[in-house]
Image (cartoon, grey):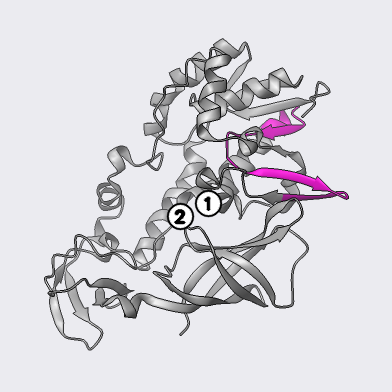
Amino acid sequence: MVGERKKVFVALSGGVDSSTAAALLLEAGFDCAGVFMITSDESRSAQADAEEAAGKLGIKLYVLDLRSDFERILDYFCSEYKRGRTPNPCVFCNRYIKFGKLWDFARGNGAQLLATGHYAKIIEHNNNVGLYEAANGAKDQSYVLSMIDKDILAYVIFPMGGYSKGQTREMAAKFALGTEEKQESQEICFIPNDDYVAVLERRCPELVRKGNIVDSSGNILGEHNGVHRFTIGQRRGLRVAMGKPYYVVKIDAESNTVTLGPKEEVMHRRLRATGVNWLTNELVSAFRAKVKIRYNDRGASATVSPQGDGVFVEFDEPLTAITPGQLAVFYVQERNGSRVVGGGWIEGATD
């Protein structure tokens, strides 16, 4: 990674990943500036951390207030729950905010490249730029990057893609950034204390309405206070005693009904996904791939069959909890690694 004095804007959160990414870019000779994004009132508390990190790095920090733009993410978040689906706001944010609005700002201020602390790889081969899994599979974040515009890939750098989290902390200490001991946030940035139910009910009080919990034969098992409190495959917190484990197998927002069933009823081999975003030349014929259906998924072997703006995916073995609203992301093994060729929004299981 040689900078050649190219101007790169780094999305700087004040955490260990983004600050170490910036330090590596500076070491490689890039002309760096940091950008801190205010996406919600909750995110303002991290601004001081970003300012401190920029000070230690000796780079200018821009503060970009994107709260009005972020309303689009919040609207999406609520509307998906209203439909009985489980949203993935980080994916939507990466497409629209980080690699959309932020890139527009960076480019408008002279940047040639955009960098973040994501654990993923951008690899160019024969004038073809692709998104690949990180070297450390346990930290890989390519799943949540799969819906970004493929045209931006040539302008993106992910300096952390070749490192483990432990190595990142060691480098942060070496660079004297003071971020090496910072705890990693597991929360969605606009959800204080990870209490998404409270945020939803404050923003969309109409979600709070009683409905029936039933089995797949329609027998009433109990009552709930809103379908937004459930997700496909959920086993805990159902408040229904069946004598054996039961799972959420269906959420019907229109009838305000949650259906439970034994594990075999939440196992499926096929799904349909729509709104596919291709990160390579659009594929029209069926192909073999590793497919991930959630962020922390290891992936499973499948045949992906494109059809219109969507795909049908048939797995070699049944999977648990194919969840509408999440992504199906398709990986093809190449010489350079496991490449993300595309991803689409899961509509549901089809068998």
Quarter of image, res 64: top right
Which region is colored magenta? 106-130
Cβ–Cβ under 8 Å for marks 2 and 1: yes
Image quadrant containing the N terminus: top right
The residue wearing badge 1 is 91
**166 vs 336: above or below:** above
Query: What x and y, as percent, mark residue 314?
Result: 56, 78
Drawn side of residue 219 relative to residue 133, left or right: left
The residue wearing badge 2 is 88
Q: Residue at x 56, y 23 (%)?
A: 19
**76 vs 32: above or below:** below
Q: Residue at x 74, y 70 (%)?
A: 283
**Quick one: label 2, few (<14), some, or many (20+) residues within 10 Å?**
many
Quarter of image, res 18: top right
Q: Which mark is residue 129?
A: none
Q: Residue at x 22, y 61 (%)?
A: 236
Query: What x and y, as percent, mark residue 242?
Result: 13, 75
Query: What x and y, as percent, mark residue 307?
Result: 66, 79
Quarter of image, res 108: top right
Magenta stretch encompasses residue 258: no
Magenta stretch encompasses residue 128: yes
Drawn side of residue 59 relative to residue 325, left or right: right
